[in-house]
């Protein structure tokens, strides 16, 4: 997912889940050397609103989960017309830049707030095993006026 529809190059990580469209930074590699990129693949990038329009997900009470190794901003940019249907979301948000050019916690928090979401919960997601520094957190949001019923 991203902010446009095109063929894009995905950097494939040794552990697969750290694969990203962005370059991995030394802080990430120092904390988790096994995540080093081992290859590249061409993949079809899609906008989330385009996928939503062509699906049968319905249009009410959607919960969005984004864990995209530094590509969260672009996925949100590609959400477009589906945003009003989303009542809750979970985003992995970085406290430290791990991928070149990624949006950090404060920027994504502001975006979600502007869209009418309230931060409900935070859980550590990735930390440096040696130092204990928390690099990223999973953050749960609900649209103001909705609950997790």
Image (spheres, helix red, strand yellow):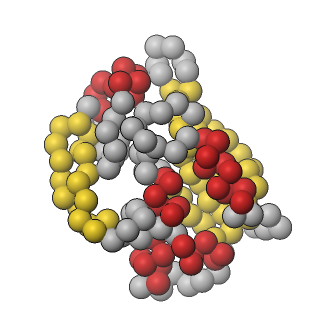
Front-most of residues 125 and 107? 107
| Residue located at (56% from left, 78% from top) | 81
Q: Is 19 left or right of 64, judged from the image as shown?
A: left
Number of marks in the image? 0
Front-most of residues 2 and 118? 2
Q: Position of residue 73 (x, y in %)?
A: 50, 54
| Residue located at (46% from left, 19% from top) | 129
- Image quadrant for the C terminus? bottom right
Q: In the figure, residue 64 lies in which quadrant?
A: bottom right
Q: Position of residue 74 (x, y in %)?
A: 46, 58
Front-most of residues 81 and 37? 81
Q: Is 144 left or right of 88, judged from the image as shown?
A: right
| Residue located at (41% from left, 24% from top) | 27
- Image quadrant for the N terminus? bottom left
Q: In the figure, residue 35 lies in which quadrant?
A: top left
Q: Is residue 112 visible?
A: yes
Q: Residue furthest top?
A: 130
Q: Is residue 139 visible?
A: no
- The answer to whether 143 is drawn above or below residue 36 in the figure is below
Q: In the figure, residue 59 lies in which quadrant?
A: bottom right
Q: Position of residue 147 (x, y in %)?
A: 78, 64
């Amino acid at each position: 997912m991203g902010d446009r529809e095109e063929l894009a190059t995905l950097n494939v990580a040794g552990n697969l889940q750290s694969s990203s469209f962005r370059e991995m930074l030394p802080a990430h590699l120092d904390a988790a050397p096994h995540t080093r990129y081992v290859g590249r693949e061409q993949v079809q990038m899609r906008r989330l609103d385009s996928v939503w329009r062509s699906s049968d997900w319905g249009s009410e009470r959607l919960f969005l989960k984004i864990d995209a190794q530094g590509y969260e901003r672009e996925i949100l940019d590609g959400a477009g017309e589906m945003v009003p249907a989303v009542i809750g979301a979970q985003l992995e948000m970085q406290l430290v830049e791990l991928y070149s050019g990624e949006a950090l916690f404060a920027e994504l928090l502001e975006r979600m707030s502007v869209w009418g979401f309230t931060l409900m919960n935070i859980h550590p997601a990735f930390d440096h095993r040696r130092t204990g520094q928390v690099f990223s957190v999973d953050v749960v949001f609900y649209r103001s006026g909705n609950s997790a019923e």
